[in-house]
Image (tube, coloured by chain):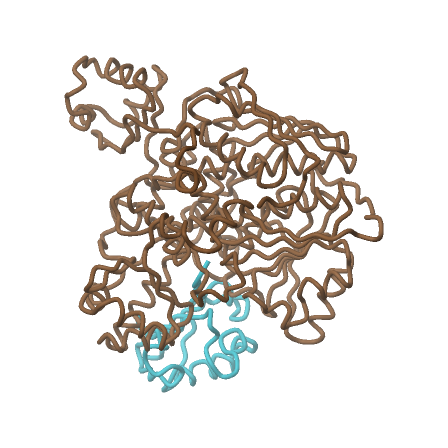
Chain colours: A cyan, B brown
Amino acid sequence: MAITVNIPTILRPLTDNQRRVELSGATVQDIIENLEQQHTGIKEKLLADGQVHQFINIYVNDDDIRFSDGLATAVKEGDSVTILPSVAGG
Amino acid sequence: MMNPFLTNCTLTGGLANPAPDFLAVAQSLGYQARSLGFAVHSQAQPMQADLSFHIQSQGGTSVQCTVSRWHDVHDQTPVTESILQAACGLMSVHGRATGRAQALGLNYVSTLSAALALQGGIAATLGQLRGLPMMHSHVAMSAAALLSVGQYIAGATAEELPEKLIPAQIIHPDCPPFVSADGVVFELETLDAKPWLAFWTELGIDKPLAGKGWTAFLLRYAKAIAPLPNEFINAVASVPYGYINELAQRYNVSVCPVRTLQERATDADCQRVFSQGPWAFSREDLTTALPLRTGSRDNLPLSGLTVIESCRRIQGPLAGHLLALLGAEVIRIEPVGGDPLRGMPPMADGVSARFDALNRHKTIREIDIKSSAGKAEIVELVRDADVFLHNWAEGKGEEMQLGASDLQAINPSLIYAHAAGWATDNTEHTLLGTDFITQAYSGVAQQIAQQSGKLGGSLFTVLDVLGGVVAAQGITAALLERQLNNKRIQVKSSLISAATLLCAEPLQRIYSPDTNEPTQTSLINSVYATQQGLIAIECVDEASVTRLFAALDKSDQSQQLAKLLLSKTAAQWLTIFQAVNIPVAVVVEDLTDLLNNPLLQPCLTTSSYTQVISPWSFS
């Protein structure tokens, strides 16, 4: 069983309009690299200078990776990775 | 100290004895117009059907302005501040954080209505000067109220996973503000996850829990809720505020006690902001004549004018949105790849409904403003523009060589506008100038707390919305001043100045205790449960109280109103009470119900989400 990545609507033009993509990898970084291999251009939407963009949240299951090991956060088969833009501040 | 501005304009109208529905609007309108430099002549209002005034300028223009209760100017269904908040969804949004729909307890819709009415009149005056055939400007209070919750309506009606946030169905009694062990009620802010984690780790919150708290905390701006786990509330409740403040400074987190309006009134900048109004203008004579840009598009007053907007989030984008609704072409600068908030759920037709609600009328240019190529692109845009609007941090414009002096050197007649957090240059404090911190600092949170039985302010973005309206109003006034007097102008507005505007009436009483301005007091002003649904009732005089109890068929007014109202549904009571001219409204708890109210339908239009249309009409 692979890892499911939930793609937000705004990025679906880059994934042939797929809502979910099945991938493999040991960390979130691996997942993003593999996603980029299949859907060129998505990585730069998620990362800036090697870090998750300030206004993008990435969750492994329900946990924000910033409060785990960041891009090194481990993933395993059956996990679900969700990408969500966030709003902070008015 | 008033802004030496628009001094060759007069506002004449029925501000002296308006119908009770319009008293707070009339007071705020008079304050705002005087702050802009208008000569204000108050007259008795001949008709109680609406609030009307006219604006004349040295340029020979004359514009008649009307504020009505509802979109249909002839509809006399009575309103009050609380009734509009109930009918238009503000109570619902404000109530999400406490689990029950309730009023803000401030003259919010009235203040917004006054600002929009004055802005409409100023815009129409400018339109006349530019050759457009407009004699009349109209704003409905209901439209102002709906505008303020436009983003939340978008979220509730988006085609893809609309938000269903109904106050009574949300169970999370604990949310900001926080209370320390020594009883200090305070607000906390950070825009970044790292300081959040460092701060809470020191208070014993583990990393995974801090992550859950961060997710909850981020919901404030989008959804007006913040369902923090109890551990957060308990962690700060066990230590004194001094220690919390020390940690906040160490980790670059903003904390601010919920201050009283009296405390705010003693701040060095408060009386100045109160006296000058919510805008700070600076102006110089232009040496060259301003090219006359005639209007065209849909005969809207700012048609033919161009605004360049470089703003994030709510306050600045709303200002740009309002200028677009007045007919300006708004070119919005976004980072390369687009503003990430475009993707914030819920979505409608491929874009965040909430984002689209503020940006749908704009042309987008993706520019890296920090690169030299990007700066060159901005310079080219600015060369032919009329307004440059930004909400960057203090000093950032100058740092990027995109400050007022840089851009006005390229285009001397450009109006350079800054929609900021604080009114000062931020040397007095280092607090983040965001909505909830500003509510706490300004006394607005305490005013809301006092009226709503809460600890602090609202998670409805009270000041971002009013701040956006004030920013657009200042820009419109600057455009008129430029046209009338050939000036080069900078205008700065802020969330704190919007807060000062919102509290102008109580501040007036603090600064001038002997003032004899009438204040609106209510004999009955509450939300009641009924057999089905909630009903808001506000009676501002004895006569309406008598009519209310007569309609209930109870001459004995000591009987508990709350108990009596349980015998019928809110909709049934609405019919009964409106028939005898009592200000009532069924409290809208689910924002999708707004579409069912015939009084509001003309202000709303539905595509992939429900949009609030322009609050203005011109003829």
Q: Is residue B64 left or right of residue B553?
A: right
Given residues B611 and B506, the one toward you in this image is B506
Residue A67, visible in the rendered structure: yes
In the orientation shown, which residue stands out farthest toward the right? Answer: B288
In which quarter of the view is residue B484 placed?
A: top right
The residue shown at (46%, 72%) is A54
Q: Is residue B143 left or right of residue B367?
A: left
Q: Position of residue A24 (x, y in %)?
A: 39, 83
Number of numbered discs overlaid on the protein picture: 0
Residue A61, visible in the rendered structure: no
Q: Position of residue A33 (x, y in %)?
A: 48, 84
Q: Quadrant of the C terminus of chain B?
A: top right
Q: Is residue B24 left or right of residue B241?
A: right
Given residues A50 and B84, the one toward you in this image is B84
The residue shown at (63%, 72%) is B399
Q: Position of residue B498 (x, y in %)?
A: 49, 48
In which quarter of the view is residue B304 placed?
A: top right
Q: Position of residue B524 (x, y in %)?
A: 27, 27
